[in-house]
Amino acid sequence: MSGGNALSVMGYDVLVDQLEDAVSISGSKKIINTINPHSYITAKSNPSFRKALLSSDMLLADGSGVVLAARQISGDSITKMAGADLHQHLLAKLNESGGRCFYLGAAPATLDKIKARLAEEFPNVQVDAYSPPYKPEFSEEDSAVMIEAVNAFAPDVLFVGMTAPKQERWLDQHKNELDYKVASCIGAVFDFYAGTVQRPSDFWIKMHLEWLPRLLKEPRRLWRRNFVSTPLFLLDVLLYKLGVKS
């Protein structure tokens, strides 16, 4: 991991420091991604996704389960930092410097709403965006157009929102062809910031129950991560704590 202090949690180096102390838009290119119980379980059966996570320059604990795992296995304390927190942090930094950000993903209408909100909240940030085709996998031609759109703008920060694990795999595959200083896959944050999907309130976030309102609103999409991935993740936490896995 480049920048910040990391703690090894079940095979992944997760950031311990606060964003303000660890994340800057300077130096060599870096990729900042997040890990939660569902992505951990998904990566176990998806080698290219696992590689993308392990290749990240920084991983944030986007899930109370990862915070719990660190505490149970090693007794260490780390802070939950969601993709939305990273998004706000980077936008604030860009606003101070008059920097540039690019949104790759989501529907054109969602991107328009993001631009409108940015103009109000972060008026010094220069922004551009591209909506890729909605398909399970991109062709070489699709990727070439996406790369050209990003590089023509040459952003300081590249936000990628094409759902996991597709977004992480695509960025890892094309990271050396893209022009950016910081890149991050933040998925649902595109919809949260645009207002097309409401993020749970601070009450649920502070209670470590952010997943519950989201599950109630989108049970068909989110049931697997809560009722399959979470129990499997907790089983692995127990195995690591008992020393069965290391």
Image: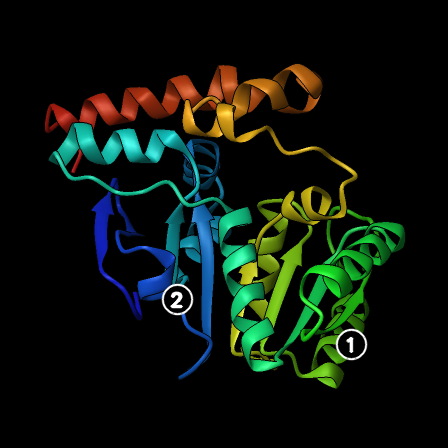
The residue carrying mark 2 is: 23
Horizontal side of residue 170 vs 48, given as left or right = right
- Mark 1 secondary-structure assignment: helix
Q: Could you say which is closer to the camera, residue 195 or residue 138?
A: 195
Q: Tell me which residue sits at (39%, 66%) in the image.
A: 23
Mark 2 is surrounded, within 10 Å at the Cα level, by few (under 14), some (14 to 19) or many (20 or more) other residues, namely: many
Q: Nearer the viewer, mark 2 or mark 1?
A: 2
Label pair 2/1, CB-CB below 8 angstroms: no
- Mark 2 secondary-structure assignment: loop
Residue 149 image label: 1
Q: Quadrant of residue 148?
A: bottom right
Residue 138 image label: none
Q: Seen from this angle, which residue lies furthest right?
A: 109
Q: Position of residue 158 (x, y in %)?
A: 61, 69
Q: Tell me which residue sits at (33%, 35%) in the image.
A: 66
Mark 2 or 1, nearer chain start: 2
Q: Position of residue 92 (x, y in %)?
A: 55, 65
User: Count of labels shown?
Assistant: 2
Q: Quadrant of residue 237?
A: top left
Q: Distance from label 2 to label 1 (Cα)?
A: 25 Å
Q: Position of residue 46 (x, y in %)?
A: 49, 43
Q: Quadrant of the C terminus?
A: top left
Q: Position of residue 100 (x, y in %)?
A: 65, 77
Q: Is residue 82 above or below residue 176?
A: above
Q: Tell me which residue sits at (82%, 59%) in the image.
A: 116
Q: Is residue 143 visible?
A: yes
Q: Quadrant of the N terminus?
A: bottom left
Q: Is residue 54 visible?
A: no
Horizontal side of residue 79 vs 181, given as left or right = left
Q: Could you say which is closer to the camera, residue 230 or residue 182?
A: 182
Q: Could you say which is closer to the camera, residue 37 or residue 144?
A: 37
